[in-house]
Amino acid sequence: MSPTVTIRGACFAYNARPVIEDLSLEIAEGDFFAVIGPNGSGKTTLLRLMLGSLKPQTGDILVFGRPLGGYSRRELARRIALVPQGSAPVFSFKVEEIVRMGRAPHLGWLGFENAVDLEEAARAIAAVGLDSLANRPLDRLSGGEQQRVWIARALCQQPRLMLLDEPTAALDMGHQLQIMRLMARLRRDRKMTVVMVSHDLNLAAMFATRMLLLHRGRAVCTGTPKEVLQPAHIRTAYGCEVLVDRHPQGDFPRLTLPVDPAAGVTTPM
Amino acid sequence: MNPRTVDLTPVRVLAVSAVMALLLVLTIVAAVSFGSSDVGPAAAWRALIGGPSSADAGAAIVWRIRLPRALLAALTGASLSLGGLVFQALLRNPLAEPYILGISGGAAIGAITGILLGLAQFPGVSLFAFTGALATLGLILAIGAGRSLFQRDALLLSGVMVNAFCAALIMFLLTLSQDGRLHSILFWLMGNLSAVGFGPLGLLAALVAPCFVAIFLLAHPMNLMLLGRELAASSGVPVRAVTIALLVAASLMVSVTVSHCGLVGFVGLVVPHLLRMLLGSDHRLLVPACILGGGAFMVGCDLLARVLPEQGEMPAGVITAMIGAPLFIYLLRRSRQ
């Protein structure tokens, strides 16, 4: 079976500024794939390339074995869904209305939902546990709840590949964990491939099956979290030292920031 | 606290449209029945049924003045409200209104030039105004021929700048003009719905109707684009094509309208907000509601503008703001509770 995403020698530049350079990558079906790297390393650009909203200047991107250019917009939207770094729209929509918009690539030319569409939306809302809030305006929800709305909206497209852009960036610890567990469960239940851009290396280490570490648009390392999250790689990409040990409850790495010996440990005044 | 959402089906759209259409018909009936002349409702109806060529004393008033004026107000209200709705969605800005891209400025310069040259209202001044509006639309599209236009703030800022430039030019032209023409110019700038013939009215209807249909067919993509351009694109919306189609349809519609009746203000800003508070944010419902409800609002305001003053009449734009603003604030307070 062909991999979900195949990238071969992709280069992309905004005007003359290269952002992705000679990147090759394979994401297998069912992977929970994390894209990590420092600010400006090209993570979001890579996500846009996979989404087809940007086209590489050189190199090929294939999804489900077919070049991106071989799909119509609608065909692509039925296979790949995006969970953006969501913000509430200027005009207030209800949760249910937003989730139903995920049916867009399945609707007829007048753009109205039929019974199947409504049922699919209800299923998506139930899958993220928002049944009781379905009629609330989005802007009355907490950050974690809003993030679940965007996930439900993407689910509604019935994609085989879901792309998430820093889904936990604005959330507290408890909600971060909740979102990651939700994604792990959805990936299993719906047999989806999940690609996630993340800044939180420890969280990514716990949930990702494979990861890519980017630095200035190039791959530093691709592999399992154990292979990628090594002090040398982190030093190359982030320019800082980390202590790496093993999570006390599982076989994945745990990163800890070191104390600067010159500055010492902060003590109470 | 949270009533169940009523599913948005074509049946619901038709039902809401039917209510709005009824409202529109009622306001037109009222607009035909009352006026500053002493033709009362009964006489007006006899004249209406008698046909335009009847010898009845009221026939001229009803068929030459009240009915065409009510129909012009309906078309104006419809297209300005819909224009406001489209620009608010396109620019994702609640303060957007149909004139925001500078169409008003361009049209005004055209119209003032026409008036200063001593042309008749139709077709002379209208044609000049329309040309001016199209010129600004062309300018906006040319400024943004690169991708950057479709970053929404770039579009907004270009519009504000074009408007500012036009405002300066308008002031300059005003200082050049003589007393009599100054009055015509001011009336044009405040919006003037005084009767046009059925000919220009038919032309207006024929030009705005296709825009109404095109915008309705793009209602669902407008919903998605409110969530963000990237999200819309990833849901299968051809964002660039839809943006250009909406921009051109709305601008054409507004240009044709203002070239008939001048810069009727406020209705394009307030009606979409009023209807959003009543019906929610779904454009599949808001597009037909703006067309019919915006028409009804404008006909009602124009009726008051004709009837209220003891002598003469005031510009309809004055009434739209005097009624619309307090109504808007009232609904805003209520919806926040």
Image: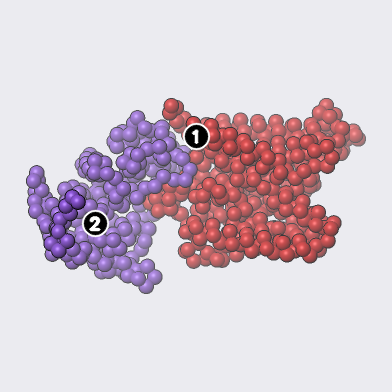
Chain colours: A purple, B red
The residue most toward the front is: A269
Decide if residue B285 is on the left or right side of residue A13: right
Q: Is residue A250 above or below residue B327?
A: below
Q: Quadrant of residue A255?
A: bottom left
Residue at label 2?
A35
Q: Quadrant of residue B58?
A: top right
B140, above or below B308, in the image: below
Residue at 62% in and 35% down: B327
Q: Nearer the viewer's eye, disc 2 or disc 1?
A: 1
Which residue is pictured at 64% across the width and 45% down the height? B266
Q: Nearer the viewer, residue A134 or B50?
A: A134
- Tell me the distance, in whole angstroms, between the alpha carbons under discs 2 and 1: 42 Å
From the image, tell me which residue sits under label 1: B336
Q: Residue B308 at what x, y percent from top left?
A: 78, 36
Q: Nearer the viewer, residue B151 or B209?
A: B151
Q: Where residue B217 appears, x then y in whole percent?
A: 53, 45
**Chain name for mark 2:** A
- Say which of B117 and A255 sits in front: A255
Q: Quadrant of residue A197?
A: bottom left
* In the rendered image, residues at marks 2 and 1 fall on the same chain: no
Question: Residue at the spot x=71%, y=61% of the render?
Answer: B170
Q: What chain letter is assigned to the residue under label 1?
A: B
**Are the two marked residues, 2 and 1, in contact with CB atoms closer than 8 angstroms?**
no
In this rendering, position of residue A224 left or right of residue A160: left
Question: Closest to the observer: A254 or B53?
Answer: A254
- Secondary structure beneath label 1: helix
Q: Position of residue B242 (x, y in %)?
A: 50, 53
